[in-house]
Image (cartoon, helix red, strand yellow):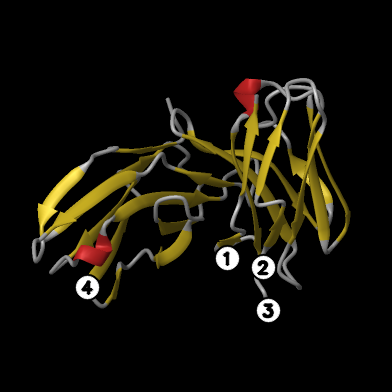
Amino acid sequence: DAGVIQSPRHEVTEMGQEVTLRCKPISGHDYLFWYRQTMMRGLELLIYFNNNVPIDDSGMPEDRFSAKMPNASFSTLKIQPSEPRDSAVYFCASSYSASSEAFFGQGTRLTVV
Amino acid sequence: RKEVEQDPGPFNVPEGATVAFNCTYSNSASQSFFWYRQDCRKEPKLLMSVYSSGNEDGRFTAQLNRASQYISLLIRDSKLSDSATYLCVVKGGDSSASKIIFGSGTRLSIRP
């Protein structure tokens, strides 16, 4: 398996623009997680899905952020409109079961100018 | 209070030394525990799971103390390649059984 695949790897956008981050989890994994990492706040869980259903979105910063998982092999995290404080590395991770470890994608480094 | 707390370090130790990290968690209903390693500008990767009875993987030993709600990682005979950030990870709880929470990480630097 190729592991968790995220795209793009890097994104530079202007404030106010819409940004869409994409993730393909490992096949057969029922859980998908979106994290944001910054120097100041570390790794923050934004939202996670189980069998394509959002379970906990309490970490989503505000209404500008939304996430979807239309099927078992694809998820998106959208920021609209983007702001400079959204600049961070966004990681997607997946896990097989409720008790198993999570495997991470390589992340998307987002810069909003 | 953060759900998972770690000493951020940095720990700067000579090669060959033994170093230990601790991590505390606030949710007593947490079910699974892990240590991850993250290299600079890379994604976190699983180092080892932490079992109730404690477990060892080569130079690495992990311990769990449920009563005191802390997890530890011991690295013996440290190598230069051990330099990284070590993240304590707690999974599960009463309100959200599969939620995975990361500590902020402890930076380790091994000097020659």
Query: Which of the labelled discs sits on residue A96, or is there none?
Result: 2
Amino acid on which disc 2 is placed: Tyr
The dot on residue B47 is: none
Q: Residue furthest right?
A: A70
Q: Which chain is indicated by disc 1?
A: A
Q: Which mark is residue A1?
A: 3
**In this rendering, do the residues under marks 4 and 2 share a single chain?**
no
The quarter of the rendered structure image containing the N terminus of chain B is top left
Q: Which of the two discs, 1 and 3, sits closer to the camera?
A: 3
Select label 3 or label 2 by which is in front.
3
Residue B93: x, y in percent?
57, 45
Task: Relative to A73, say whether A50 is above or below.
Answer: above
Residue located 47% across and 62% down the image: B45
* Residue carrying label 4: B59
Query: Is residue A80 found left or right of B46 in the rendered image?
Result: right
Residue B71 percent coordinates (x, y): 32, 52
Q: Nearer the viewer, residue B61 or B47?
A: B47
Q: Are marks 1 and 3 in contact (CB under 8 Å)?
A: no
Task: Please say if the residues under marks 1 and 2 sit with CB atoms less than 8 Å apart.
Answer: yes
Q: Nearer the viewer, mark 4 or mark 1?
A: 4
Secondary structure type for disc 4:
loop
Please name the residue that numbered disc 1 is placed on: A100
Rendered view: B86 above or below A79: below
Q: Residue at x 10, y 63 (%)?
A: B15
Q: Which residue shows up at 84% across the image and 54% down it? A: A52
Report crowding for label 3: few under 14, some 14 to 19, many 20 or more residues within 10 A (C-alpha).
few
Q: Nearer the viewer, residue B94 or A74?
A: A74
Q: Quadrant of residue A62?
A: top right
Question: Between A32 and A81, which is closer to the camera in this rendering?
Answer: A81
Mark 2 Cα-neighbour bin, 10 Å: few <14, some 14–19, many ≥20? some
Give how far across and how far down residue A88 sits, in percent: 58, 35
